[in-house]
Amino acid sequence: MKTGRLEAFSDGVLAIIITVMLLALPVPKGTGFTELWNAVGTALLTYALSFTYVGIYWNNHHHVFQLTNRVTGGVLWANLHLLFWLSLLPLATAWMDYTGFARAPVMSYGAVLLLAALAFVLLQRTIARSEGPDSRMQCALGRDKKGKASLVLYLAGIASAAFIKPEAPVFIYLALACFVAVAVVWVIPDRRIESSLEQHGDDE
């Protein structure tokens, strides 16, 4: 099976995820910027963060399947596993904002990000196994320092969120700083895959 059908389905799911997050934003009742902030407030910021994450996964998912020649049953299930965790992002985002960044919602948000990251790693490994030890994906994976650092930051964010209390809001900022840091790191496309594409002369 070629990759086109899987990519089209994944693109559709990611587009729906963004749409659901957007529709969750409240509409201001007034006509001024004050009413806008009072209605949307931090929801717009959390939406922007989650939108960035979805964009990052869409970008890297696209690059991964440029290195993939065929889709096996294992790859299909690994891809669905990734989409499952990403599909929980709208719920985690809305819950975190609605509760004013309470401990359990922030921890849950971090857990969704962590599990999505692990699912993406699993997808890459599944593709590499299905295409053999000399596959382009296997060569591109390398030591994955950025991926490992991201997992550490996710865990640090979740651990920080565990200490959130009304009298200690600093842990909210620490947790969110960890999640934002990962997004900043991954805004630049995965250079391992970019380099492999360049070496093989593939088009974007």
Image (cartoon, grey):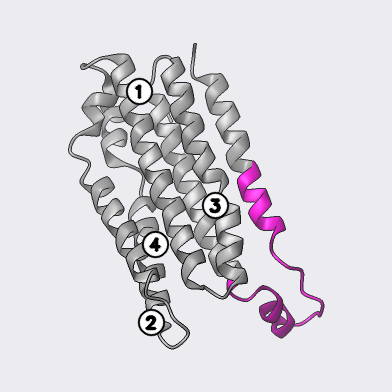
The region drawn magenta spans 16-42
Location of mark 2 (residue)? 170
**Vertical placement of residue 117 versus 31, above or below:** above
For the residues labelled 2 and 1, say whether their Cβ atoms are less than 8 Å apart: no
The answer for how far apart the CA atoms under marks 2 and 3 are is 24 Å
In terms of depth relative to the viewer, which is nearer, 25 or 108? 108
- Is 161 rendered above or below residue 59? below
Q: Which residue is mark 4?
A: 179
Identified by mark 1, the residue type is Ile
Reading the image, the residue beneath label 3 is 89
**Which amino acid does the dot numbered 4 rest on?**
Phe
Mark 2 secondary-structure assignment: helix
Q: Nearer the viewer, residue 78 or 63?
A: 78
Residue 66 position within the rendered picture, expressed as x and y whole percent measured from the top left: 40, 25
Q: CA distance from mark 2 to mark 1?
A: 41 Å
Three-letter code for the amino acid on which mark 2 is drawn: Val
Q: Secondary structure at mark 1?
A: helix
Residue at figure coordinates x 24%, y 25% from the top left: 138
Q: Is residue 103 above or below residue 142?
A: below
Q: In x, y percent, where is residue 134?
A: 21, 16
